[in-house]
Image: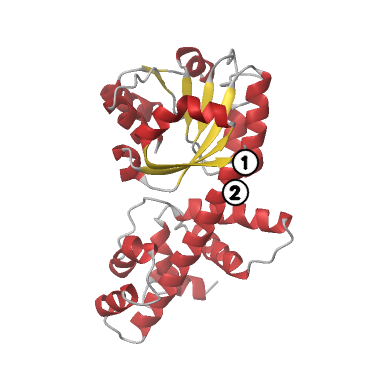
Amino acid sequence: MGANIARRLHDVGYPVAALYDVNRDSAAAVAKETGGEVVDSLARVTSLSDVVLTVVTDDAAVYRIFAENGDSLLEKARGKVFINCATISPKVHEDVERLANARGAESLEACMASSIPQARNGTLYLMVGGKRDVFERVKPLLEKMSASLKYIGKAGRAAQVKALVNMVMNINTAGLAEGLGLGDALGLDLDMLREVFSQTGANSRVLETDGADMQNRDHDVYFSAAHAAKDSGIALELAREAHLSLPLATATFEQYEKMKSLGLGELDKSGVSELTFASRHAQRAATSL
């Protein structure tokens, strides 16, 4: 996602000053298209940039890149704006804003509800949290990344909304996998079944994006099962804090955790169908657990 955001911003005239990735070859490949220095330290990213966009894996990765000591994006960060696009816990965004402000910098969360092609084409759906005046300052850049841009509120609020978006999406995905898996077990024509779903209350955005992939076992990764598990876990933690029981979200989380335990975590989230089609290897493996 980060690589394709860089390509998009380069295409629309924003100079890409620095590229950093734990896999240096990935950064080098993007640099060939966008220019910019492939750097070996986080501090160098900040020194070369006015606005720093980050897309990392999880809460721990965010705390590492915004560490208070050692190599960090916070080194000499005064006047910089950090835009954090990863799906992480809301509290982490609150902490990053506090840490950035203490160094004279600002931060926003720009949570993405889209996938790789949208990042490349600048058609992301972005939910933004943080100070309103900081949002207005970088809004022109965010508009070049997105087809729709929504300011949600203070730090952490956009991350809460994103967690709920992904929670519901994951529930829909797991439900569709069960519907198609049962249809397959009954000997129904799945092309017909998907067409009927599309014209009835079973319709969903997930049916459009994942239905054929589930049927055809085409699980090229746009959003991995491991990330689905992580994001459902974030939503469940918010539910625990709110003293709510969410049985559907819990069951979905357990399905994606099962995929990870079976070595399927790097499949696309549509790969949850590997657990629901009786003829498939993962179903047999899961039954034997």
Seen at 59% across and 40% down, the residue is 153
Q: Residues within 10 Å of mark 1 (few under 14, many from 20)?
A: many
Residue sitting nearer the eye, 109 or 31? 109
Q: Is residue 67 left or right of residue 41?
A: right
Q: Secondary structure at mark 1?
A: loop
- For the residue pair 129 and 266, the one nearer the viewer reads as 129
Quadrant for the N terminus, please. Answer: top left
Q: Position of residue 49 (x, y in %)?
A: 46, 16
Residue 289 figure quarter? bottom right
Question: Residue at the location (40% across, 68% down)?
Answer: 273
Q: Is residue 56 above or below residue 13?
A: below
Name the residue beneath numbered marker 2. 160
Residue 282 seen in the figure:
no
Q: Residues within 10 Å of mark 2 (few under 14, many from 20)?
A: many
Of residue 282 and residue 81, the one placed in the foreground of this image is 81
Q: Amino acid at mark 2?
A: Gln
Q: Please state the horizontal and vertical placement of residue 288, each as a whole percent of the image.
A: 52, 74
Residue 82 seen in render: yes
Q: How is the image coloured?
A: secondary structure
Amino acid carrying label 1: it is: Gly
Which residue is located at x 35 percent, y 87 percent? 186
* Discs 2, 1 touching: Cβ within 8 Å: yes
- Per the image, label 2 sits on a secondary structure element best described as helix
User: In percent of the image, x 64 and y 66: which residue is there?
Assistant: 246
Measured Cα–Cα span from mark 2 to mark 1: 6 Å
- Residue ID for mark 1: 156
Give the quarter of the image for residue 116: top left
Residue sticking out furthest to the bottom = 186
Image coordinates of residue 181 in percent, x first then y, are 39, 77
Q: Who is closer to the viewer here, 159 or 276?
A: 159
